[in-house]
Amino acid sequence: MKLPEVEVLSKHDLDGLKERIGSAELPASDIALIIDLIAAVIWLVEELRKKRLSIRRLMRLFGIKSEKARDVIKGLDGKKSDKNKDAVKSGEKNADKSEKSGPPGENKNGHGHRSASDFSGAVAAPCLHDALAIGTDCPDELCGGRLNALPPGKFIHVTGQAPFSAALFEQEKLRCNLCGKTYTAPLPDGIDSRYDITASAMTAVLRYGFGLPHYRQEKLQDCAGVPISDSSFFDMSESVADAGVKVHQHLVYLAGQAHLIHPDDTKTRIQEFRGYEENGRTGLFSTAIIAFYKLFQIALFFTGKNYAGENVDKILQHRANDLGPPIQMCDAHNKINLPKKYAVILANCLTHGRRQFIDIRQDYPEECKHVILELGKIYENDRLSEGMADDERLRFHQDCSKKIMDDLQSWYKSQLENKKVEPNSNLGKAFNYLENHWHELTQFLRIPGCPLANDIVERLIKSYALHRKNSLHYRTQHGALIGDILMSLIQTAIRAQVDPFHYLTELQRYKSKAHQNPEAWLPWNYLQTILAIKNDAA
């Protein structure tokens, strides 16, 4: 369909149009609706002209948004055939299982009720019988037995409160009637500032962990009768970042030693750089990276003028000389994802290759269905290989997945060679995407420990997207650095199954020690460090 010739109106012309519409004898609601519709059409056409939006992607906004096989295949041929049921189930469970999975401990299947063991932060409150005890007679007069102990019953009672509470200490003051000196009662031990380190840790977790901006925290606290300004919240967050800056630097160093790196980019805004241009570049990015170091996942954020490849260079500059290049799993935008200074073993995301067919499934139902079902078998095999050692998993995929991938490649090549598909059509472009990146897409068949997809970091970058959605932008590069430090510490702690609130609190409590010896204050070993300090003190 040919796009209509819609003139992009200037502000003066648009204001004139609004006045002419307003002079018509229409209800105010109709006038507002017409104006909004005109603005929407102008925006839509302009986005299409700039190729920032396609009709197909626009249609996805109003159609099925899930990429699960059961959703995308449904309706392509009316009714699923029996022979495809197993493959569809594989696609349902695994092709996009990343949307269900997350850091360890998340998304447990069940009936929805949380067991008492999940409430690790609850304060135990023993409830004892008033008149009964171990060894006393049974209250049933006809029984005659004695009471023995059983494991206690557990009942969870949850109360509500504002994130920040305050205590008002009224210090007694005495003054001498002769010399006039005033004597003020001292504050309790440990009370030396207005804002406790727990308050600073909480505001950092709320904003940089769960996307609640400082100004919304201010409004919430005003309603609760404990007013705290957003500038005070920022100062508290800054103090937490200062306590953790050396630990963050050490995490960057450890990420440089990782055997597997997942980077991804998203756009960001920093007011300080508004309108900048440097060597022809104007973009600002926030890069999320997950680095697998030994048994741990290190989550890092870098916000500024550098894109993913440059930020990967930033962490690989710390890599030990005796280590070989790490595996880098990313999408196929290799121009911006690949580092320039350091070598990596490139692997591309199979989910992105699958998505090429998700987008065009309505136009080419049979071909897209075939690809989706075949890739669903690969994801099912990957699920079955969970828990295997890297070498064992590699052999399993070579035995069970290689033939599927080889047959798929032969099939789409024959489609192109036999001219059943126009190379410049959307389906031909999807086939060519697979062919152009086939080696990188199938690295899991050659390299031990190579994953199938980059979903893990795409989930991570959603935490930044939530922050960006609620806070809109950073004001300065310094503010962005604070966000990077705190997001990195919080998300790394979550992946180490550590309470980020407690972790940030202790980093502040032992700030000087964390600066002197940051390798002892990582999320997975700081509790042992605190225990050793307490034992030495005892």
Image (cartoon, grey):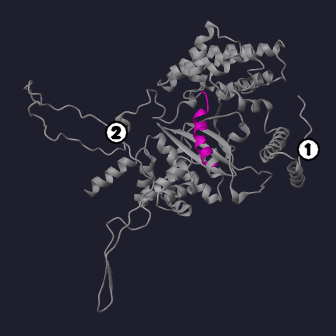
Percent from the top left, x then y, of residue 91? 60, 19
- Compared across the picture, whether 405 is left or right of 137 comes to right
Q: Is 430 inside the magenta-drawn segment?
A: no
Residue 464, image quadrant: top right
Residue shown at the point (72%, 58%) measured from the top left:
273
Q: Is 464 inside the magenta-drawn segment?
A: yes
Q: Main secondary structure of the magenta part?
A: helix
Q: Secondary structure at mark 2?
A: loop
Q: Which residues are magenta?
A: 452-468
Percent from the top left, x then y, of residue 117? 35, 36
Q: On the image, numbered disc 1 is attached to which residue?
A: 7
* Quadrant, the N terminus: top right
Task: First in sequence, mark 2 or 1: give its number.
Answer: 1
| Observer-nearest of 315 and 205 | 205
Percent from the top left, x then y, of residue 168? 38, 66
User: Callout 1: few (<14), some (14-19), or many (20+) C-alpha neighbours within 10 Å?
Assistant: few
Specify the amino acid type for callout 2: Ile
Q: On the image, numbered disc 2 is attached to which residue?
A: 156
| Observer-nearest of 198 and 529 | 198
Q: Secondary structure at mark 1?
A: loop
Residue shown at the point (37%, 44%) measured from the top left:
121
Residue 330, placed above or below residue 85: below
